[in-house]
Amino acid sequence: MGIALAAACGDEPPALPEIAAAPIERVVEDPSDAPLAGLSEEELVRFEDGDARFELPFREAQGLGPLYIHRACTSCHEDDARGPGAVRRIVRRGADAPALPWGDVVRPRMTAGASVPVMAPAHPAIGEAVRLAPAVFARGLIEAIPDAAIEANARRGTGGRVARLRDGRIGRFGHKARTATLDEFVADALLGDMGLTSPVRPEELPGPEGIRDDAKPGVDVSDEEIALLADYVRLLAMPRREARDGTVFEEIGCATCHLPSMRTRDDHPVRALRDVDAAIYSDLLLHDMGDGLADGIEEGAASGREWRTAPLVGVRHLRGLMHDGRARTVREAIDAHASEGSEANEVVARWRALGEDEQRALITFVEAL
Ligand code: HEC
Ligand code: HEC
């Protein structure tokens, strides 16, 4: 993984390191930024409006800050995929670690007169954990899968559990499936990543200086702006892919977690999302992935060792693999699945026992997803 320096903008402090992991080799060149086929005229208009908002950097006058990470969704979801921007989480390792009164997310940039960012306290019991973004395409399909299908996956007896949130709903979004719907995720992204408040998230996050507002008094974005961004994500097409032979993927058990397909509900308000086979390659369950991937952060229903099965749909578009981009190739990603206590250990052992040709067939399959 390479470290590059982010470009410094006028009102921003000195450049901070950002993750710039090498993209995995693209075997199919295609755009990821296309709407679902069969949208109505009205849906297409919303898609396009949301698309423009997804790319536009927010300005101070629109309520950016007072503390923020990046100005545009695309800073961390370039081409609707992953990176180059990242989120740095602050992790307390042990009971002597100092409390984190301003939350556990590094918010390095400032506007609206703020002069003290939120950074990880320098302390031997404090660490940092990087999170790269999942892609945002095909997320409308993920949202459209009925709860019962996810619950059925957990009953197969092959491991994994439903990310049941405190209010009883099933978490689907975020690396630890902490959020149930796209609208809520977008509201959280606006507040947490950009310092933009909204009717559902009306309070600025606390900061060291106690600044309660920014250059735009009161709530910064409307419910409708959130809905447009969520609709853009919701209506993004599944990236096209070449059909390749997935036999080895199924045989050794990658497909038990990376379930090739689930059926969406038949009563979804968007016709194009209704009753389709969503080839997302995830069971949408939480799995204990062992010491190696554990970050010690509890989120939603997930423990510090659990992760949502990463949807492999469009994985060829991603820069860096696994939640923190530690793997640059599919081979490295598979290796990262194995460590003390990981539910994937047996499958990785089967992968290691494969002959060279079968290994190559599996990699070729995954690289084309
Ligand atoms: C500072 C970087 C950053 C910015 C800016 C950002 N995101 Fe994200 N996004 C992430 C990260 C990191 C995650 C994974 C979060 C987690 O689980 O910790 C994520 C997750 C998501 C997801 C969930 C995807 C999934 O499969 O679970 C959606 C949807 C999303 N972002 C949409 C947006 C939108 C819309 C914007 C702009 C309003 C935005 N993001 C801005 C970094 C960013
Ligand atoms: C026990 C469930 C499980 C099994 C079995 C499993 N995976 Fe995964 N896989 C996951 C989880 C959970 C993640 C996300 C972990 C993370 O982000 O740190 C993941 C991530 C990945 C990623 C990275 C995706 C991304 O968005 O960065 C790839 C590639 C991948 N798996 C391929 C495979 C292959 C190939 C196999 C079979 C050899 C396999 N997996 C077996 C659960 C599983």
Image (tube, rainbow, N blue to C red):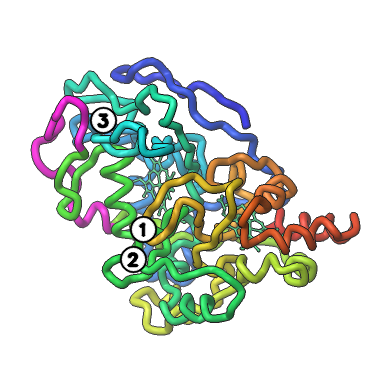
For the residue labelled by badge 3, is the local secondary structure a helix, a strand or a loop? strand
Q: Which residues fall within the magenta stretch?
A: 206-227
Q: Residues within 10 Å of mark 2 (few under 14, many from 20)?
A: some
Residue assigned mark 2: 165
Residue type, label 3: Leu
Mark 1 or mark 2, which is nearer the start of the sequence?
2
Q: Residue at x 60, y 34 (%)?
A: 21
Inspect the magenta stretch and tell me whether residue 299 lies in it.
no
- With 214 as the anchor, is 56 left or right in this view? right
Q: Label 3 to label 2, Cα distance in Å?
A: 28 Å
**Would you place residue 280 above or below residue 133 in this image?**
below
The quadrant holding residue 61 is: top left
Residue assigned mark 1: 300
Q: Which of 15 and 157 is in front in this view?
A: 157
Q: Residue at x 26, y 43 (%)?
A: 191
**Would you place residue 190 above or below residue 354 in this image?**
above
**Would you place residue 254 above or below residue 195 in this image?**
below
Mark 2 or mark 3, which is nearer the start of the sequence?
3
What's the mark number on residue 67?
3
For the residue labelled by badge 1, is the local secondary structure a helix, a strand or a loop? loop
